[in-house]
Image (tube, rainbow, N blue to C red):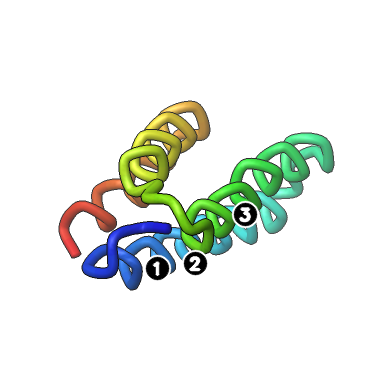
Amino acid sequence: MVENRKQKKAIQAIQDLIIEARNLAHKNSPAKELAEFLDGVEYLPALIIEEKDNTDLFEKFLKDFCTCNNCMNVVNRYESR
């Protein structure tokens, strides 16, 4: 799970990443690139719903993922919410 006080912004970050994926699709990115991006996004909801505290893992994965995919704007919004 993600700490209760951070759950809403964690879900908003996932939504922001879905928007990023849609932007990749509109830019006609290769299907493999889009699939790999979505594979990363798919991991995040599982961290929210597990029973153990995954807050640190969620935040680290989000930062690493966004760094690798050039979408640090998602992390910036997550941190400022």
User: Does 66 sit above or below residue 7?
Assistant: above
Instruction: Depth check: give the residue in front, 65 or 58.
Output: 58
In-front residue for pair 64/31: 64
Q: Amino acid at mark 3?
A: Ala
Give the vertical position of 45 relative to 8 (above or below): above
Q: From the image, state whether disc 3 or disc 1 is nearer to you.
A: 1
Real-space CA distance between mark 3 and mark 1, rounded to the nearest whole angstrom: 14 Å
Q: Nearer the viewer, residue 21 or 39?
A: 39
Q: Separation of disc 2 and disc 3 at Cα?
A: 10 Å
Earlier sequence position, callout 2 versus callout 3? 2
| Tag 3 residue | 21
Q: Which residue is mark 1?
A: 12
| Image quadrant where residue 33 sits | top right
| In contact (CB < 8 Å): disc 1 and disc 2 | yes
Q: Position of residue 11 (x, y in %)?
A: 43, 67
Q: Secondary structure at mark 3?
A: helix
The crowd level at tag 1 (other Cα within 10 Å; few <14, some 14-19, many 20+) is some
Q: Are marks 3 and 1 in contact (CB under 8 Å)?
A: no
Nearest to the observer: residue 50 or residue 13: 50
**Residue on which the image places disc 2:** 15
Q: Sequence-wise, which precedes: disc 3 or disc 1? A: 1
Q: Is the C-beta separation of discs 2 and 3 under 8 Å?
A: no
